[in-house]
Structure formats: C-alpha cells, structure tokens
Amino acid sequence: MNVGDLPTPALLVDARALERNLATMAAARPGDALRPHVKAHKCTAIAAAQLRHGHRHFTCATTREMVGLAQAGIGDDLLLANETVDRGRLAGIAGWQDRVRMTVAVDSAATIDAAATAGVRDVLIDVAVGLPRCGCPPEDAGRLADGARAEGLRVRGVMGYEGHLMMVADRTEKAARVAEAVGLLRAAHADVGGEIVSAGGTGTYDLHHEATEVQAGTYALMDTDYAKLGQPFELAVSVLGTVISVSRRWAVLDVGLKALALDHGNPDVDGGAVWFCSDEHLTYAPADGQRWPVVGERVRVWPAHLDPTMAKHELLRVVEDDHVVDTWAIDLAGW
Amino acid sequence: MNVGDLPTPALLVDARALERNLATMAAARPGDALRPHVKAHKCTAIAAAQLRHGHRHFTCATTREMVGLAQAGIGDDLLLANETVDRGRLAGIAGWQDRVRMTVAVDSAATIDAAATAGVRDVLIDVAVGLPRCGCPPEDAGRLADGARAEGLRVRGVMGYEGHLMMVADRTEKAARVAEAVGLLRAAHADVGGEIVSAGGTGTYDLHHEATEVQAGTYALMDTDYAKLGQPFELAVSVLGTVISVSRRWAVLDVGLKALALDHGNPDVDGGAVWFCSDEHLTYAPADGQRWPVVGERVRVWPAHLDPTMAKHELLRVVEDDHVVDTWAIDLAGW
C-alpha cells in the first residue's frame, strides 16, 4: 500500500528514522543504562524494537502500560515512574511479579501503604528535584524508605525527574542545573540506599553520569519541540492529512486538534505556515513560490508534542518513503 | 456505585444538568429548528436524548459520526457539515440513504465530484462567512450549485458556520456581526435555492432568525470557555481525578492533558488554582483557607474545551450527585 491510499488523518512513522534514533541512543546509553519510557509512544511494537536494541528495562506512566508490556512479554524489569493509590490497579501489576520484576514509585506514606496492601514487592522512592509535581522532598526520602521497608517492601533506590530542565537551550546552563538536581537526588540516595538511581529524559540523556539509568522516551520518534534542541535524533512521526478545501489565501487539511496535541504549540506543515488548528481542521498559508495546493493532495504535519499525539490514534502506519510496510497498534493508551 | 469507587481519570456527566440544558435549548429552538452537532459529545446516548427532546436532524463532522448515528437508528436526516474527497467513506454514507437521509457539505468542484461518484444524493453548498476554513466564496455558491445539479445531485440549500464569532462577548457587537455573516449566507442562498439555510452554534444560537436550523453542539454539556458567555446552559461535564501527591505548596491530580484538552487554556479545578498540566498530571495550589488536600481524595476538574476532551475518553459516567447511575460509550470518536 502507498501512503496515498490511506484514509486520513493517519499517523505515520518513518521506519528508517526510527531505527537510526534507536541505534543512536543505544550507542550513547547501551543496555540497562537506558530504561526507555513507553509513555512517549504507547506502542508495544516500538518497545519490542527498543528491546532488540538491548534495553531490557522499561519505564511506564500508567498501570495499563505496565500490564500491557507484561502481557506482550516485553522487558524483564518494569518501573511505574508515577504515583497511584488505586489498589485494584496495583494488584493488577502485582499479579505479574512471578514473571516480570514490577517496581512502583512512591513518595508518601499513603502511596507506600497502597503498594504494600496491594501486594507489590518492589518500590523506588520518588524524589522532587525541582519540578513542582510528584516526589518527596529530598530530606524526607530516607524516612520514607524506612517506612517502606517496615511494611515489607524492597526499596531498590531513588528516582527524580528534572522535567523543568528538558527544554533549557543553553548547554552549559543545562549541565549546571542538571548537576544541581542530581545533587538533590544523590543526597536522597545516600539516605535511601539501593542499587538504582533513575533520572533524566531525552532532553538531558547525555548529562547523567551518576544516574544508573535514564528514563528517555521522546528520542525514538521525536517532535518539533524537542527537535529545537539540536540533538542527534530525527523527526520520525508525522500526521498525514488531505487538502479538503482551498481558497485564494489559505488551504485546509483534515488534520485538526483531535489528531494532534497543541499543548506545545502549533504543528509544522510541509510547504506552508500554520494559521490555526480547530477540532477537525488545520488552516495554513501555502509558502510563497510553491505550487498552490489542490483539493485531494496529501500533506504531512509534524506535531509539537509527541506523547499526547500518539494517544489520539489507534494505529501507527510504518512507512519507507511513500510505501506502507507495516501497521502497528497504539496499544498502551488509556489508563 | 459511588463516584468514589471509579478508577480515575473518569469523565463524568451530571444527568440533571444535561437534561436542563437539553430542555432549555429545545424550548428556544424546538424540533427541526435545531440540528444538534454530535461532534461536541460523540456519544449516541446523548444524541438519543436530544432526539427525545424533539430534534430529528443531526449535524456531524466526520463520516464515522454519520455512520454511527445511522447504525444506532438515531435521526432521520443527517448532515456531514464538513468536506471530504474520501470516496470510500462517502460510499459508506451513501449505503444508508434508503433508510436515512444523508446530506454532505461541498465547497468545490472536487468535493462535488467525490460525492457524486460515491453515490451520495443530497448536498448543501458550504459558504465561507468570515471564518478562514472551509466554504466557498459567497459569489461562487450559485455556480457550484449548478455544477452539483449537473452531476445529478440534489442541492438542499446552504450552510455557513460563523465560528469566529462564537466567543464575541459583547452581545450588541455579536448580533451585528452575525447579521453580517448571515447577509453573506442569504446572498448565496438566493443564488443556490433549496429549503435549508443552516448556520450557527451554541455561541450564536439565539441570534439566527433567518436560518432554518442552527448547528449547536456544546450547549448539551458545556465547558468553561463557553460558560463565560453567560448563556442559560450549565457545566455538565467534568473529569474526576485523585490526589496522588501533596507537598507544602501544591497538590497533584492524576488528570493530565491525556485526559483533557488544553487548546482553550487550562481547566478549572474545584478548591484550587491550576499551575500547569502535563501528560498525566495536574499541579494546582489549593485555595487559601481550604483544608489541605490529602492523598487519595477525589477532585473534579472542569475542561476549557469540550469536544476534544470527549475524544480522549472511551466511557462517560452518568452521575446524580455522587451516584453513578449509568455508563455511556463515547462511541462516535475517531474518523
């Protein structure tokens, strides 16, 4: 099949760009030095490709991602890098522990109690390192670890996500601020113990010399926001649209905000400048000097934020040039 | 079941507020004077409720919504108020024409040709009335109608969506600008003929005295953006979250931008002020003087943009106070 035959909007992944991104990261952080975050793609087929590149441990944001990977038989050590007090869902994770190592992040007495009650065996202490979101204050980490051990949990170490630093453009400033965040995490680790110090993301993957593992996800597929950082990863995901209406000043695609996430800004569009997106449409001005678009032609749109864009689709079309060589399910979305 | 027993994030609709919204609109634009837009809710159970309130004709944005309503046996006159040249999907619509009247918007020779080739019988001429999106220039409408009739299509009239005027706050200015847009549509209708003049939305539903029908959708469920207009419709949809982490300055819910749309801004949260949303989290500052939240408690979040929020969920929990009285499928999402 050719991309021209696909119903639109259609989510496309460039198979060769994906492979190059995976190889580049596997060279920089081989094997267990990377714990790929599946929330970026929500797709077991891509997780399987990351496994083939040598990464056996995975990071998840939801219990559905944890159970979905386990059901697919991908990875032997899965981390829920997020808090939950949903005992039913935690028990669903715990049910897999004889086959897959399942570890859950905790940052409070309540999350520790929920994990222990649900039968979870392994936890990491989640430490706040500057992003105002989950994670305990570094000075509380040791006390929480003691509490977890008192409830019979194994405490494998610490994690801390410096999400507020991913988009810092200046490399020197970024390195200094990451070192500061890592300092907080290291202090917590001294109090907590355990073999794991988990941190980072695509924006900081090459600045973590003390972390035992990095939780990068976006690198595999990328988006226009991360692409601004100038890292050695290529844009591999686009949304294919069809021109459905043309006027003398603008053209309209059938790719709207139901098909791509706008929370990091408008997408880029091949051959034009985006005016705005609405639910089912993208209005753009074709570039000066370009042939004016005609109704029916296909145009690729490049999302600014990968993760929630993936969540808006059920299928990912794997393409090489204009040939559709495979179709993968986005099978880890939802909760 | 109680809302406290639901896994979160969970999309809730207040059954009584929905009923009041439907009754208020049915009194203002009874029966066929309203063609409810199902893109706002994407839910056949809500379309069935609109039918019970007397509206037999429906508006759709996608072929999936058209076919989904037909399969559910809801409505006897469905309008695709959007352009497509996908002959396969148009043929899917045409296959229902012996049981349901199916009408498709067209705004170019290419869309007319696609409809005719696919076996569609009825079209409306979509006219641009100020929003830079689909629709032909008003002066081209008559020529397009002639072209459609030459291809054997029945031209039922015109439609024009003044989407750029929905959020105009000043009522006098809004009325004047709607009248201007309607003037363009009326001029096109004079050239096109037919029994239908379809226009408007929730933001302008009470300003259309010349339209034969209004395409309002949001009024049924509402969002915080439309609520600013002070219309007689209540917020009926919220996303239920669980507090998963608490610090001395903020609290975190498990409701992020994967569970609600941010393209009209941040949501509102009961008992606090939103700092920011990330993929799976909402960080907020509990209001001064409020009891500080504890991990595990439930909080309702009020989305700023209804339609794409609905598209992020599979189920809608119908609640009266804190009781879950029914569960409806969001069964018209996708394309």
Image (cartoon, coloured by chain):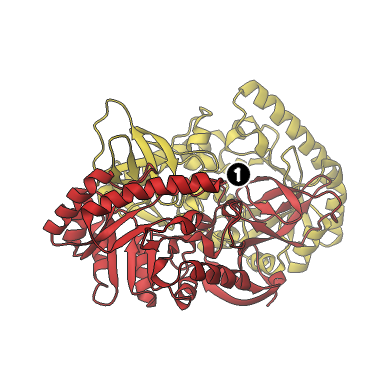
Chain colours: A red, B yellow
Q: Quadrant of residue A243?
A: bottom right
> Is residue B254 among what the camera can see?
no
Q: Is residue B251 visible?
A: yes
| Parent chain of label 1 | B
Where residue B316 appears, as percent x and y from the top left, is 40, 52
Which residue is pictured at 57% across the width and 73% down the height?
A19
Question: Where is residue B330 shown, x and y percent of the image?
Answer: 46, 56
Q: How many marks?
A: 1
Q: Foreground: B250 or A28?
A: A28
Quarter location, residue A296: bottom right
Q: To which residue does mark 1 refer?
A: B32
Q: At 16% across and 59% down in the image, what residue appears?
A: A117
- Counting from the top left corner in percent of width and height, residue A214 is at 41, 61
State whether residue B261 is above or below residue A12. above
**Location of the N terminus of chain A (image quadrant):** bottom right
Q: Is residue B179 left or right of residue A57?
A: right
Judging depth in this view, the residue of A38 and A249 nearest the camera is: A38
Q: Horizontally, is B272 left or right of B98 in the view?
A: left
How far from the left and from the top, in percent, is residue A284?
A: 73, 48
> Which is more toward the observer, B12 or A60?
A60
Amino acid type, residue under disc 1 in the picture = Asp
Q: Single out the residue that lies furthest toward the left.
A: A150
Question: From the viewer's perspective, is A80 left or right of B200?
Answer: left
- Mark 1 falls on what kind of element? helix
Label 1 crowd (10 A; few <14 / some 14-19 / many >=20):
some
The C terminus of chain A, quarter of image? bottom left
**Residue name at image x 87 percent, y 59 percent:** B150
The answer to which image quadrant residue B299 occupies is top left
